[in-house]
Amino acid sequence: MQMRVLGKTDIAVSALSFGSLFTSRLGPGIEESRRAVHRAIDLGINYFDTAPAYANSEETLGECLSDIRTLLVISTKLGGRPQPFDAQDKRRLVSSFEESLRLLHRDVIDILFIHEPDRPQQYAWWTNPEETYGPVIEVLDDLKRRGLIRFTGLGGTTCAEMAHCIRSNRFDVVLTAFNYSALFREAAHEVLPAAKERRMGVVLGSALQQGALGRRFDDVVQQKPAWLSQPRQQQLLAFYRLLDESGLNIVELCLRFALSDPEIHTVLIGPKTAAHVEASVAAAEKGPLPADIMGRLDEIAAMVPFRPFEEPMILPLNNPQGYWGPGIANLGAGAPVGKSLARRASEGEP
């Protein structure tokens, strides 16, 4: 497994890293998760990411790693625990971190991310959004000073908002998801350049767009559900034609695309089984994509340079009838931007 330096942290991480969402009750069970984790380590993966918001992932990952003596890189996040969650309460933030240490059986966490720092209606982290400042910054600084964390990070899914947080120059690593893949390139405009300018480590999540690029959905795309825009439909059809012409497997192509970008230091995979790990590693070992394939991909990605308005953040190609359309718009609902639902409720707002 190729090793890469994670930006200014100087941590050496494997080109593929292990996202632990399904190493939880959302996955196939503890024994299969253990096999997947151990197989990943056998194949050279040394970086594992988890979060309190990923069901019981921290606990399960900690159990899977309990008998491992290999030196690993572990990251987790602040956000979502304890409930009701209050991003302004330093005592609760420290308590959440201490729970992470306990569940993961660690004395030190290598990277502690702020989860969704770019979505103030989910977690209201900032008392001063312009300066990307709030109580969590004081908590992170204190944990780092005490030697309980090595580096700090941002883990989010937007573009302009994440780039703004990155430019605060307060963090060491960024985990960006849902916005950079073979077909989706929004992060290339601001997120990746801002991170590069500050020598931040870049962790890429959702290289398979949460499963939308995990396999082909030819019939669904041809039928065009109401929520699938015509530009996106035509883009997906062109992408499938490229797969046919090149003979490449869709997962292999998407992983090799992500690994071809020198601005991406490690690419998270979200395996459920040891077989998933083996397939991802086999794809990675084939190296960067040929220049002609990269050129074709760039052309296809340019067919939809930005998401069509109200496109689902996660394209529900695997369950096209299960998505009914957009929810209530913020302005239509009178929802004050910048306040979490919990904070609005505590202040007596609807």
Image: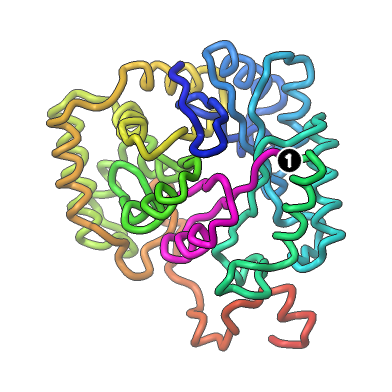
Residue under pointer 1: 149
Q: Which residues are magenta?
A: 150-177
Q: Residue 3 location, x and y as percent?
A: 47, 21
**20 w.r.t. 348: above or below:** above
**254 w.r.t. 145: above or below:** above
Q: Residue 28 location, x and y as percent?
A: 64, 29
Question: Is 157 a magenta residue?
Answer: yes
Q: Residue 56 location, x and y as percent?
A: 74, 40
Q: Quadrant of the C terminus?
A: bottom right
Q: Is residue 125 left or right of residue 39?
A: right
Q: Nearer the viewer, residue 31 or 253?
A: 253
The answer, for residue 316, to whether it is visible in the render is no
Q: Is residue 117 left or right of residue 209?
A: right
Q: What colour scheme governs how the chains and residues are painted in the rendered image of this protein?
A: rainbow
Q: Which amino acid is tagged 1?
A: Ile
- Under tag 1, what secondary structure? strand
**Residue that sits furthest to the top in the current view:** 42
Q: Nearer the viewer, residue 196 or 315?
A: 196
